[in-house]
Amino acid sequence: KLGPPAAKLVAEQLGIPVHQPEKPELPADVDRVVVCAYGLYIPTPLLERSLWLNVHPSLLPRWRGAAPVERAILAGDERTGVTIHETIAALDAGPIAAREAFDVGELDAGQTFARSAEVAARLLADTIESPSFEPQSEEGATYAEKITAPDRELNLDDPLDSWRRVRALSPHIGARGKLHGRRMTIWKARLEDGRFVPEVVQPEGRSQMTYDEFVRGLR
C-alpha cells in the first residue's frame, strides 16, 4: 500500500513544511543542507554551492551504501554507530565531522535505527554550526548493498545466521523460511543454547502471531 513516508507525517503534525521535488533543488540563500537516506543524485553544482552534511547510520568507512544497519547486523558486528560527513560525489566517502559508536547487542534493525536517530540528533546539534572535518580513510571500506529477495531467505541449518537475519530484517522487511512445511515470514526469534527459536511469525495469507499460537493451530 502506497502512502506518505513516516517522516512526512510527523513533520506535518509538527507544522513543518514538507517538499518532495522530483530532483534536488535549493533556494539561493541556503548555506547548510542535511540529508539522510537520500536516494536521488545530487548534481555537483549544488554540492559546491552549499555545505551538505549526510547522516549515515554506520561507522564509516565500514558499510557505505544503501543498507548499513541491516548489513552490520547480518555480519555480526558487535558495534555500529552514526557518522556525520560532508556529502561529496563519491558514495558516503566525504570527510567526517562526527562519529559515535554504540553496541549492537541483540538489537533488531528497528531498534538500531531508533538508537541511531537519537545519536544523530545530538551529533548534528553539536556540529552543524561549525563543523570541522577529517579525511575519511579508504582502509576498511565496505559496501552495504541493497537487501534483495535471496537475503531474506533463512538457512535453518545455521541458527546463528538465521537469528541475525531475522533481527536485521525486522520490523520492516522480514526474513522468510519454511517451518512445519509452511512458508512464512519470521519477525522475531531468539538464540537459545545454540538453537534458533522463532517467536513471532506470519504464515502466508495470515496475520502475525506468536510461534506458539502457530504450533497450537497445527494440532
Image (tube, rainbow, N blue to C red):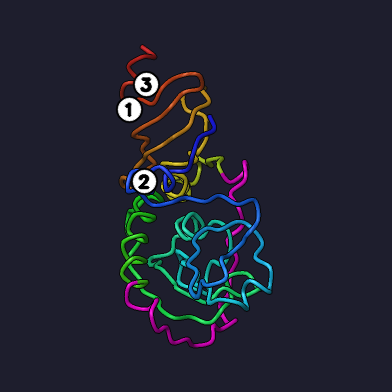
- Three-letter amino acid code at the position of disc 3: Phe
Give the label on residue 214, or none.
3
Badge 2 local density, few (<14 within 10 Å), some, or many (20+)? few
Between marks 2 and 3, how big is the CA–CA gap?
Answer: 35 Å
- In 3D space, how far apart are the residues under numbered discs 3 and 1 (Cα atoms)? 6 Å
Residue ranking furthest to the front: 28
Identity of the residue drawn at 56% across and 76% down:
50
Q: Nearer the viewer, residue 147 or 212?
A: 147
Q: What's the mark number on residue 10?
A: 2
Q: Specify the segment rendered in magenta.
A: 125-151
Observer-nearest of 128 and 143: 128
Question: Which callout, 2 or 1, points at the residue further toward the start of the chain?
Answer: 2
Q: Amino acid at mark 2?
A: Val
Residue at image mark 1: 210
Q: Is residue 145 rendered to the left or right of residue 51?
A: right
Q: Position of residue 16 (x, y in %)?
A: 38, 52
- Tally of marks: 3
Q: Quadrant of residue 98?
A: bottom left
* Residue 180 falls left or right of residue 143: left
Vertical comparison of 9 with 99: above or below: above
Towards the viewer: 59 or 175: 59
Q: From this view, report whether residue 191 is shown above or below residue 38.
A: above
Which amino acid is tagged 1? Thr
Give the foreground label among 2 and 3: 2
Residue at x-position 33% and y-position 68%: 102
